[in-house]
Image: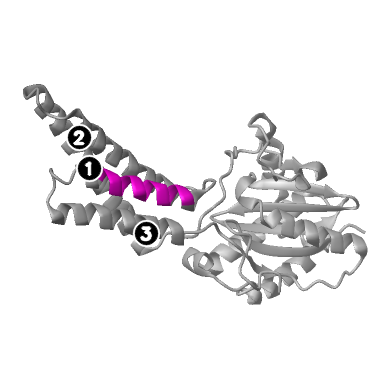
Amino acid sequence: MSMILSASVVRVRDGLPLSASTDYEQSMGVQQCRKYFKTLSKKLAQLPDRCMLKAGQYNINFISSLGVSYMMLCTENYPSVLAFCFLDELQKEFITTYNMMRTNTAIRPYCFIEFDNFIQRTKQRYNNPRSLSTKINLADMQTEIKLRPPYQISMSELGSTNGFAHLSAAEFKGTGKISAAPHQRLEAVTLPGIVSFILSLLCGALNLIRGFHAIESLLQNEGEDFSYVIAFFLGTAACLYQCYLFLYCTGWRNVKSFLTFGLICLCNMYLYELRNLWQLFFHVTVGAFSALQIRLRQPQGKSPDYNV
C-alpha cells in the first residue's frame, strides 16, 4: 500500500529538527531511513532545494525554503507529485505559523513540536487519495516537477566521506539551484565580532593610507627608509587577513590568527618612530581583540541534545 510514513521539519543551516510526526512504523527499513534523515539533515545547506533519495522500498523527499527544510518518508510507489504537494502544504502552513526570527533563534530540538498536529492531519489526508481529489490541484505541481525535476541523490553520495562536496555543476542541472563547494559553517556573528571586523578594516585602511604617504615621502626625499613602506603594507595585509579568518573557516585557523596578530605587533614595533603611543596601543589592541573574536567564533556544532 502506497503511503506517507513520516515527516519532519529541519533547520537548514545546522540540521536542527524543529518538528516531526509521531511515527508508529518500526520496521528495519524505516529505522534505517531515519538514519538517512539525520545524515541528510547535516548536508541540507549543500543540496538543491528539491531532492529525492531512493532507499530500497522507500523514498525520502524534501524541499528547502527560507532556511527550513521539509522532509518526508514514503513508500517507493507513492506518487512524486503527491509527495511534493504534501511537502509544499507543510511549508506554507509552517511559514504562516512561525516567523523566521523564531526558527533562526531556536536552540532546543523539536521546539515546534505542536506543529506535529498539522503534520498528522495532512498526512492522513494524503494517505487517503479520495479525500484529495477535490481539495488540491495537481496540475501545477506536475508541471513544475516536469520543468524542474527533483535532484536524485544516490546512496553512494549519501555515504561518501566528504558528503556532496564533489558534485559538479552539471550534476545539478535541472534542479534550479547550483551548490557551490561548501565551507564548514561558523557560529553566528556576535556584536563584538562585528565591532572587531569593522575595527580591523579601519586599521587596514589607516595602514594603507600611511603606506602611500610613505611612498610619496620616499619619492620626495631620497634619505627616507623604504622599509617603512613595507611595514605599513604588511600591516594592511595582516588586518585584512584577520577579517578573512573571522569570516571563513580554514585549516589551522587559530594558529593563523595568532601569527597574524604577531605580525601586527612586529609592524607596529618597527613603526614606533612614526606613531605615538596612543596609535600603537590602538593598532595592537584591535589586533588582539580581532584575534580573540576569531578564536571565539568556532565552527558550528550540534547542540548536546540534538539526537534526543
Q: How far apart are marks 3 and 2 (CA)?
A: 30 Å
Which mark is nearer the camera, 1 or 3?
A: 1
Specify the quadrant of the image occupied by residue 19.
bottom right
Q: Where is residue 23 in the image (x, y as percent from the top left)?
A: 81, 71
Q: How far apart are marks 1 and 3 (CA)?
A: 28 Å
Image disc number at residue 237: none
| 166 to the left or right of 54 | left
Question: Would residue 210 appear left or right of 111 to someone viewing this image?
Answer: left
- Residue with the mark numbered 2: 228
Q: Which residue is drawn at 66% across and 69% down?
A: 306
Looking at the rendered structure, the secondary structure element under dot 2 is: helix
- Of tags 3 and 2, the one toward the viewer is 2
Q: Mark 3 points at which residue?
A: 193
Magenta highlight: main SS: helix
Image coordinates for residue 159, horizontal then vertical, percent: 78, 47
Q: How far apart are marks 2 and 1 (CA)?
A: 8 Å
Q: Which amino acid does label 3 sit on?
A: Gly
> Which of the pair 7/125 is nearer the observer?
7
Mark 2 belongs to which amino acid? Tyr
Q: Give the range drawn in magenta.
A: 255-267
- Give the residue at mark 1: 270
The tag earlier along the polypeptide, 3 or 2, is 3
Which residue occupies 51% across, 55% down? Answer: 186
Could you tell me which secondary element the residue under label 1 belongs to?
helix
User: In the visual, does 242 lie left or right of 90?
Assistant: left
Q: Which quarter of the rendering shows the C terminus? A: bottom right
